[in-house]
Image: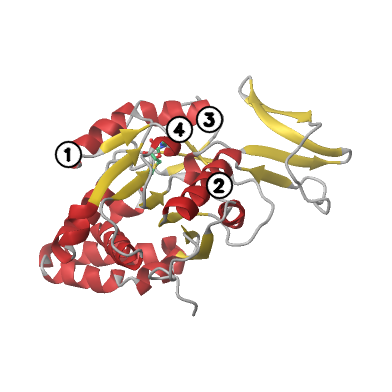
């Protein structure tokens, strides 16, 4: 799966109407703008360190970061001046798209090689693209499911990650070792060097079972095993486990919160209303795009926002307890 996912992104730009799926920054510019302001306020709470690494994991077309930078240049130029943009991206096709929008950024293959120092990290729909391992409960214990010869095969496993004893037969349990390793690494970095990370993605707020492996092609569901590398394969992000991995490394965590609530607290709908007033011809589209991000029946409930940060940092915007 890892290879299939990497191969998928390496060869194409999958976003938007002609592509296989769309993401929040491609739906509304207010998304990136609000996250830029989130980063700016968080930077002030950190004591306004200069320079600060402004890091994005899996930036796609670079839309979120471009919208964020435009907004902060206007509202908080001191943060724009202090921010050094670092992008973690493996796909050559998407790096080229990002370079066109983000001149002056630096690119990295992995999170670990982003230069040391205080950092603000944003990851939208990054963790869902990382490989997972799937286990299924059978009568005689846990078996791991693999993709082989175009289908699933199951194999008894001697050593599994911690899996719940109470799982009923047939239960599927997913472990995102790659995602957990990155959350742990980020947690350690933020504890040592300061800063905060904002993770936005879809997945349950509570731990649980379930086969979430899914594939998207042409905006519809596709068979995840058809033509590896040609469809987008993702899995739900296990937010409680990611948060626990970061805490284990010494970071504090806030959330996960439903993304709609988080974005509303950041003022996304007010920003969209301003954009709509200044572009009356597109007003309907602008407002319905923003609505889709916050509405529970849109992306507002299934998507979550999670913050990992230095334990001494005050609660970042949007994560205040209700
Ligand atoms: N954040 C963007 C794109 C999400 S798609 C948006 O919201 O529109 C996932 C992104 O993660 C793509 O840019 C993809 O190329 C990148 N990616 C996937 N696996 C990766 C990995 N292991 N390391 C770095 N980037 C990866």
Q: Nearer the viewer, mark 3 or mark 1?
A: 1
Instruction: Tell me which numbered mark, 4 or 2, is placed earlier along the sequence.
Output: 2
**Residue situated in front as seen by the camera: 302 or 83:** 83
- Judge depth for marks 1 and 2 and give the one in front: 2
Q: Which residue is mark 1?
A: 103
At a point 30% along the width and 69% down the height, the residue shown is: 268
The answer for how far apart the CA atoms under marks 1 and 2 are is 30 Å
Which residue is under mark 4? 231
- Could you say whether the residue bearing mark 4 is in a helix, strand or loop? loop
Front one among 233 and 56: 56
Q: Which residue is mark 3?
A: 2
Helix, strand or loop at disc 1?
loop
Instruction: Report the Cα–Cα distance between label 4 and label 1.
Output: 30 Å
In the picture, the quarter occupied by the N terminus is top right
147 above or below 180? above
Verify CB contact (< 8 Å) between mark 4 and mark 1: no
Of the two numbered discs 3 and 4 in the rendering, the one whose residue sits closer to the viewer: 3
Please tell me whether mark 3 sits on a helix, a strand or a loop. Answer: helix
Q: Are marks 1 and 2 in contact (CB under 8 Å)?
A: no
**Contact? badges 2 and 3 (CB < 8 Å):** no
Q: Is mark 3 within 8 Å of ligand 1?
A: yes
Which of disc 3 and disc 2 is earlier in sequence? 3
**Residue at mark 2:** 184
CB of mark 2 near ligand 1 (< 8 Å): no
Bin the neighbour count of mark 1 within 10 Å (Cα to Cα): few under 14, some 14-19, many 20 and up: few
Q: Position of residue 245 (x, y in %)?
A: 60, 51
Give the mark nearer the N terminus: 3 vs 1. Answer: 3
Q: Return the disc, 4 or 1, that comes first in the chain's sequence.
A: 1
206 or 15: which is nearer to us?
A: 206
């Amino acid at each position: 799966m890892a290879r299939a996912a990497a191969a998928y992104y390496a060869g194409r730009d999958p976003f938007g109407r002609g592509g296989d799926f769309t993401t929040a920054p491609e739906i509304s510019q207010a998304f990136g703008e609000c996250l830029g302001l989130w980063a700016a306020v968080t930077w002030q709470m950190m004591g306004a360190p200069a320079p600060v690494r402004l890091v994005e994991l899996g930036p796609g077309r670079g839309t979120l970061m471009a919208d964020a930078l435009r907004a902060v240049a206007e509202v908080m130029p001191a943060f724009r001046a202090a921010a050094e943009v670092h992008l973690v991206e493996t796909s050559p096709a998407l790096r080229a798209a990002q370079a066109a929008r983000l001149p002056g950024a630096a690119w990295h293959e992995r999170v670990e090689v982003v230069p040391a120092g205080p950092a603000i990290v944003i990851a939208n729909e990054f963790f869902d693209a990382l490989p997972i391992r799937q286990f299924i409960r059978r009568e005689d214990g846990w078996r791991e499911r693999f993709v082989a010869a175009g289908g699933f095969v199951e194999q008894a496993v001697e050593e599994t990650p911690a899996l719940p004893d109470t799982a009923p037969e047939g239960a599927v349990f997913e472990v995102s070792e790659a995602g957990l390793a990155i959350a742990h690494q980020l947690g350690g970095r933020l504890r040592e060097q300061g800063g905060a990370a904002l993770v936005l993605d879809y997945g349950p707020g509570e731990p649980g079972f379930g086969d979430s492996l899914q594939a998207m092609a042409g905006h519809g569901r596709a068979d995840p095993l058809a033509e590896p590398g040609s469809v987008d394969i993702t899995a739900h992000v296990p937010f409680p486990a990611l948060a626990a991995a970061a805490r284990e490394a010494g970071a504090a965590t806030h959330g996960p919160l439903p993304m709609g609530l988080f974005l509303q607290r950041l003022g996304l709908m007010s920003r969209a209303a301003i954009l709509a007033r200044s572009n009356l011809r597109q007003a309907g589209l602008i407002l319905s795009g923003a609505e889709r991000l916050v509405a529970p029946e849109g992306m507002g409930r299934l998507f979550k926002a999670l913050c990992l940060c230095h334990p001494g940092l005050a609660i970042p915007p949007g994560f205040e307890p209700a």
